[in-house]
Image: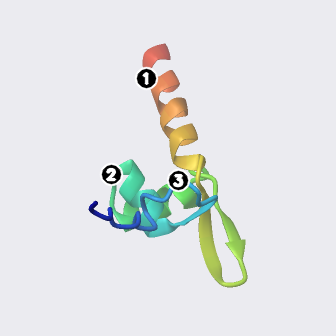
Amino acid sequence: MENSPAPTTADDPTLILLTVEEAARRLSVGRTTCFALIRAGALESLTIGSLRRVSADAPAAYLARRRAEQSAA
């Protein structure tokens, strides 16, 4: 029987907080764009010590809001 590799942190469904890079990867955008979304308040994040983290459900919530905005327009 073949052992499957452990999921990478970006794909780990048990994480509740993501790095900005992981959130950017989930949104298929670059790190700079992800930070811009955070600065604009479009993507929820929090600071823990000196680290910026994004809630694991924040990328999906952002996409849901964007879809609603586009369908309303």
Q: Earlier in the sequence, mark 1 or mark 3?
A: 3
Query: Of the residues tagged 3 and 2, which is closer to the observer?
Result: 3
- Kind of residue indicated by mark 1: Gln
Residue pointed to by mark 1: 70
Q: Who is closer to the viewer here, 34 or 8? A: 8
Give the CA separation, mark 1 to mark 2: 18 Å
Badge 2: residue crowd in 10 Å (few <14, some 14–19, many ≥20): few
Q: Nearer the viewer, residue 28 or 15?
A: 15
Quarter the C terminus occupies = top left
How far is mark 3 from mark 2, CA to CA? 17 Å
Image coordinates for residue 36, horizontal then vertical, percent: 47, 60
- Which residue is label 2 attached to? 28
- In the picture, the disc for residue 13 is 3
Q: Amino acid at mark 2?
A: Ser
Residue 72 image position (x, y, % from top left): 49, 15
Label 3 secondary element: loop
Quarter of the figure with the N terminus: bottom left
Pointer 1 local density, CA inside 10 Å: few below 14, some 14–19, many at least 20: few
Element on which disc 2 rests: loop
Q: Are marks 1 and 2 in contact (CB under 8 Å)?
A: no
Q: Are marks 1 and 3 in contact (CB under 8 Å)?
A: no
Q: Name the mark nearer the viewer: 1 or 3.
A: 3
Where residue 50 sits, quadrant-wise, is bottom right
Q: Is residue 64 above or below residue 50?
A: above
- Mark 1–mark 3 distance (CA, rounded to whole Å): 28 Å
